[in-house]
Image (cartoon, grey):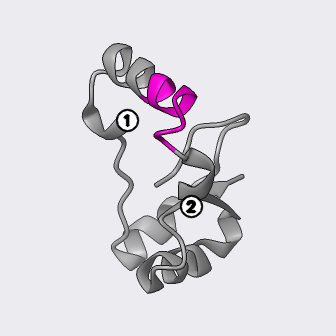
Amino acid sequence: AVGLGAGVPQIDLRDLVMRGKSVHGCLEGDSVPAVFIPQLLKLHAQGRFPIERLVTAFPHRDANAALAAQHSGDVIKPVLTW
């Protein structure tokens, strides 16, 4: 998963083509943001959605480490930052 933050990420198209990689976009898992985000905020305010325990940030250069941590179960939601 990649979050959209400040700045514009640079993607090497040669890497996509030569290594068969792909980039896919979606917004909140293709939910309806106007409904889903307020629900999450309400659950978080009630202490029922511990986002701090679910998300771990990794520099984008550590994408392989982020995936390994997710696959091992050490991390629930790795987020790559630029």
Q: Residue at x 59, y 72 (%)?
A: 63
Q: Which mark is residue 56?
A: none
**Horizontal and vertical percent for residue 43?**
45, 30
- Disc 2 residue type? Asp
**Horizontal and vertical percent for residue 78?**
54, 63
Q: Residue at x 43, y 18 (%)?
A: 38
**In the depicted view, which residue is nearer to us: 68 or 48?**
48
Of tags 1 and 2, which is closer to the observer?
1
* Circle 2: element type: loop
Question: Which residue is the site of mark 1?
Answer: 28
- Disc 1 residue type? Glu
* Circle 1: element type: helix
Q: Which mark is residue 12?
A: 2
In magenta segment, residue 48: yes
Q: CA distance from mark 1 to mark 2?
A: 25 Å
In magenta segment, residue 82: no
The earlier-in-sequence mark between 1 and 2 is 2
**Horizontal and vertical percent for residue 77?**
49, 60
- In the image, is residue 34 above or below residue 6? above
Boundaries of the magenta span: 40-49
What main secondary structure does the magenta stretch of the protein show?
helix
Disc 2 packing (10 Å; few <14; some 14–19; many ≥20): few
**Horizontal and vertical percent for residue 79?**
58, 56
Quarter where residue 80 is shown: bottom right
Q: Is residue 51 left or right of residue 24?
A: right
- In the image, is residue 26 above or below residue 17? above
Q: Is residue 23 left or right of residue 78?
A: left
